[in-house]
Amino acid sequence: MSMSEKKTSKTKMSQAEMNETKKNIIETEAPKQESQKPIKLYVLTGFLGAGKTTLLLHLLEHFADKKIGVIQNEFGRLGVDGPRLRQDGIEMVEINRGSIFCSCLKLSFVQALAELGKRDLDFLFVESSGLSDPSNIREILSAVAELGVNSLKFCGVICLIDAVNFLRQCSEETQIAGTVLPGNQQSNPGFPVQNGKQDREYISNASLKVGPHTPYQDDESEGDHRKNASENTCTVTRQLAHCQLALINKVDLVDDVQLKKVEEAVRHINPHCLIARSERGYFDLELLNQDLLSRSRTAACEASLNTNENKPKTFSLSCGDVLPSASFMSFLEACLTDAFRIKGTVHLDTGWRQVDTVEKLIDLKETEAQNESTLVFLSKIGPELIRTVDRAWKTQDLPPMKLKN
C-alpha cells in the first residue's frame, strides 16, 4: 500500500464503517420533526486547563431558555466534568477514553452528532478534550451529512487560549518542530520566521513531522515518555490553526506585556480568526451573532494528530476515607510534574472539594458530597505515573486507596 493510500485509509471512513453507523442511527433514531429547524453547532477546543468547561457552563446559563445539546469528551475512563454539565432539559452525550477526532472514537462522535441532529434543539455544543486535534472536523461533519442529517448548522470552532501558559506551551512545541514564535527568546537561524498565511501552514506542517508518535509501553524509558508528552502539546497550534474564534482566557491573571505577546503569537499561528479576550470564561456573547465562518478563512481539513497509538495513559484513584488536607496537598504537589492534569472530587477534613490541577496550579472548590473520593490522572510519562502516585500517597501516610486503569 502506498503512503497516499495509507493516509487516505486513516483519514476517511470506510464504506463498511459508514454502513454500520447508519445501522446504529436507524436503530436509535428519534421521532422526526415535521420541519427540522437548523441547530447551531459550536465546537469548543483548547489545551488542558484553558477553561472550556467553565465557558460551557456560562453558555448553558446564558441560553437557559433555549433547547441545548452537549457532547462532552474526556480522555479518561471516568467523565469528571459530565456531572457538572448535566442539567434539566439538557440533551447530553459523554464520549470518554480518547479524542473524538481520533479513529478510535470518530464513529462514536459521528453517531452522537447524527442522533442529536434529529432532536428538537436550538444549539449543540461540543466540548473536546484538551489534547484533541480538530483538524478533521470537516470530514466528520461530511460523514454526518452522508447519514442524511442536514439539520446541523456548523457555526465554527471556538478555541480557548490559556493566557498564563500559552507562550510556554508554544515554546515547548516549537522546540520540537524547529520553529520560533513571536515572544519566544530562543531563535533558530535554520527556520526563519515568516509572515501571513504561510506562518500557519508552516507551523502546522512542522507539527505533522513530529508524528506518528511512539505508543506508551511499559518497557520504555522515562525519557521516551517525556518526549511523547512534549509531542502531545503539538495539538496547541493545531487547535488554534483550525478555529474561527480564538478566546484568550484568564486575561486577569497576566500583565499587559504578556497579553500582547500572547495575542501576537495567536495571530502568528492563525492570521484570519477573530480574537477576543475572556476572563473566567466570560466573553462578549454578541460574537456568536456574527457569521464566524465568513469572517475568517479556515485551514484546510487534514488528518488529526490524535491516534490510538499516541493516546496518553489515564487511570483513576478512589478512596472511601476522609483525607487530611495538608497531607493531600503534599501528595498532589508530588504528582504535578508527571501529570498533564489531575481532576476529581475528594473528601477532605475541611469538607468535599472539587480538584483541578493545571501545570503547577492546584484549584480546590467546594462541591457536593459523593460516594467516595475519586481522582483521574492524565499522564505525561505513561504507566510510570502509577508508581509516582502510589509512592507519593504512601509517603504522606494517607488511608488505603485503589488504582484502576
Image (spheres, rainbow, N blue to C red):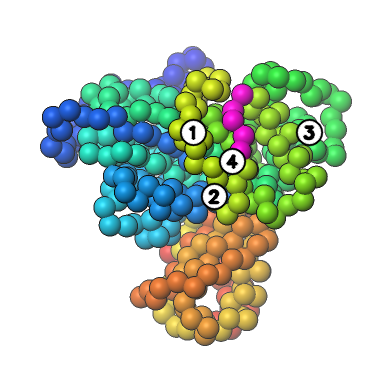
Q: Dot 3, how many residues are within 10 Å of its Cα: few (below 14), some (14-19), or many (20+)? A: some
Residue underneath mark 4: 247
Horizontal relation, residue 248 to residue 347: left or right? right
Residues rendered magenta in the picture: 272-276
Residue visible at 77% across and 46% down?
256
Residue underneath mark 2: 282
Q: Predominant secondary structure in magenta?
A: strand
What is the quadrant of the C terminus in the image? bottom left
Q: Secondary structure at mark 1?
A: strand
3 or 2: mark nearer the eye = 2
Q: Name the amino acid type tagged 2.
A: Tyr
Residue visible at 49% across and 15% down?
4
Q: Earlier in the sequence, mark 1 or mark 4?
A: 1
- Are dots 3 and 4 in contact, CB under 8 Å? no
Q: Secondary structure at mark 4?
A: strand
Q: How far, Cα to Cα, is label 1 from label 4?
A: 11 Å
**Residue 369 numbered mark, or none:** none
Q: Secondary structure at mark 2?
A: loop
Q: Earlier in the sequence, mark 4 or mark 2?
A: 4
Q: Name the amino acid type tagged 3.
A: Pro
Residue underneath mark 1: 157
In the figure, residue 235 lies in which quadrant?
top right
